[in-house]
Image (tube, rainbow, N blue to C red):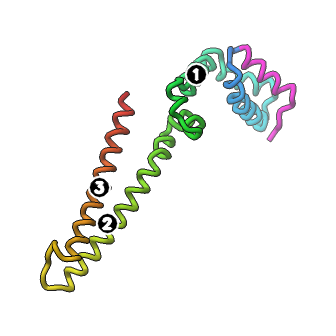
Amino acid sequence: MEKLSPQQLATLHNHLIQTGSTDALIEELLDHLACEVEHYMWLGLTFESSLNNVLEQANIKAVRHLRETYQIELAMTDEQLEQASLDDIVFEFRNKAYGAYDLRRAYPINLRNAFIMTLSLFMMGMAMMDRLGRETWSYVSLGGAVWILGLCGVTFAVVSWYLQHIRQQQLYMR
């Protein structure tokens, strides 16, 4: 694979400046454009031909659209910044488009629900084995109390998951 010289990178950088890119967007796009030019050069095109192919795609209209999208996606309000953790600031908008941020934020709740569900199902299984070993069943016995406690745990985990699911759907609708 061909590697671009500093002069060739400067040409790409100047094009991005001429199209009205912000400094933050230039940092993001320069590497992508350089990779595209290097790919075309690897296929056998000259730098000028490769540059023309890439610049057709990175025209003023495309860069303007990217700049507007970048500003919308990466701009946090003062209220959001006050409430946001460092992870929120770093990852929220970068991963928001494909859902990774929502998945990452849901990990602690999902882990808690999985732990409660596992423990509760284990308790219900132990109560069921106790029931099979005896001829009578009573909710007042130790086995019955363990069964009820397990049932409460399963119910809590299911209701917690459902409420979290509803909250996420409401966030997407906004």
When asked about the image quadrant of residue 18, the answer is top right
Which amino acid, mark 2?
A: Ser
- Look at the image and say whether residue 2 sits in the magenta stretch: yes
Read off the residue under disc 1.
71
Which amino acid, mark 1?
A: Gln
Label 2 sits on a secondary structure element that is: helix
Please say if 112 is above or below 91. Answer: below
For marks 2 and 3, the one nearer the N-term is 2
Read off the residue under disc 2.
120
Read off the residue under disc 3.
156
Viewer-nearest of discs 3 and 1 = 3
Binning the other alpha carbons within 10 Å of mark 1 as few (below 14), some (14 to 19) or many (20 upward) gives some
Q: Quadrant of the N terminus?
A: top right
- Look at the image and say whether residue 168 sits in the magenta stretch: no
State which region is magenta.
Answer: 1-18
Please say if 121 is above or below 5. Answer: below
Q: Quadrant of the C terminus?
A: top left
Main SS, magenta residues: helix
